[in-house]
Each structure stands twice: as C-alpha cells, then as structure tokens.
Image (cartoon, rainbow, N blue to C red):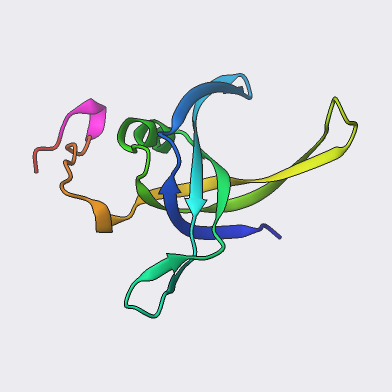
C-alpha cells in the first residue's frame, strides 16, 4: 500500500530543474524543498508554528518545468503525492542512513498570498492557440 501525503507549506528555495534519463529518454524533474508547518491558534487571535518539518519533493514532466518557471522561494504551496523512504550506507561511518522524499503528483499555489495571475492561452490541435 502506498504512503499518500498531502500538505501545505512554503518553498525554502526556488525549484531546481534538471533533466534525467529514464528508460532511454530525457525527462524533466524539479527538486523542491518545502517546510510543512503546523499552525495552531495561539489564544490571541493569531497562529503559531508547532512541529513543522522539511521534506524533499520531486515533481516530474511538464509540471516540473512550470514549477521551475513560476514558483519563487517562499511561495505557499499545497503538495500531494507518495512518500518514498530511501536508505543507504554512509561511506565514512558505515552506518545505515535514511530519509523520506515526496514523489509529487501535484504542487499547487496557495491562493491566499497571490497578487495577480496571468494565464497562457490553451493549445489546440497542431499547436494552434485558442483565443477563446
């Protein structure tokens, strides 16, 4: 059974886009580092962060390209996908190490902090643009 995860947080840096070979073809992947906070009421009408955590997130394909182009450091996002646990042996100490990573199905902007947005026109057949 897959370990599904969904959370909201802030980007620690702008996404880093790179190309990787998968099955003999080049694919785009964006690496993101997101701080998933846990906001709780502070009793004075505000909120305070309690128990947040950092998580490495990978987003693939056209969504990766868009994320790298659009998302700045500090952007508030919602991310959803599958948690994957990676293990390895430390070369210096010989100890077993591990970390969690999110293979994201989606990373979406949280609308609460946007000032404006510009949409590109929808592509139609054979690369034509739809002006409607």
Seen from this angle, which residue lies furthest right? 94
Question: Residue 92, image x and y in percent?
Answer: 86, 25
Name the foreground residue: 60 vs 74. Answer: 74
Tell me what residue is drawn at x 49 percent, y 65 percent: 38
98 vs 12, left or right, is right
Q: Locate residue 97, reporting x and y percent.
A: 80, 40
Q: Is residue 86 left or right of residue 76?
A: right
Quarter residue 71 falls in: top left
Which residue lies most toward the left here? 131
Question: Residue shown at 19%/37% (left/top)?
Answer: 120
Tag count: 0
In magenta, the rendered stretch is 124-129
Q: Which of 105 and 15 lies nearest the eye of the viewer?
A: 15
User: Please, is residue 16 above or below residue 6 in the view?
Assistant: above
Q: Quadrant of residue 93?
A: top right
Q: Residue at x 34, y 78 (%)?
A: 44
Give me the residue at 16% from left, 41% from top: 118
The one nearer the camera, 50 or 109, is: 50
In the picture provided, is 65 more to the left or to the right than 90? left
């Amino acid at each position: 059974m897959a370990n599904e995860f969904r959370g909201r947080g802030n980007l620690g840096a702008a996404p880093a886009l790179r190309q990787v070979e998968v099955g003999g073809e080049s694919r785009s992947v964006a690496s993101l580092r997101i701080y998933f906070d846990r906001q709780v009421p502070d009793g004075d009408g505000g909120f305070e962060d309690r128990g947040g955590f950092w998580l490495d997130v990978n987003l693939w394909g056209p969504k990766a390209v868009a994320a790298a182009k659009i998302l700045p450091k500090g952007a508030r996002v919602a991310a959803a996908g599958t948690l994957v646990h990676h293990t390895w042996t430390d070369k210096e100490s010989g100890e077993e190490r591990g970390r969690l990573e999110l293979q994201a199905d989606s990373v979406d902007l949280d609308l609460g902090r946007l000032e404006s947005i510009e949409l590109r026109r929808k592509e139609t057949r054979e690369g034509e643009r739809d002006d409607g």
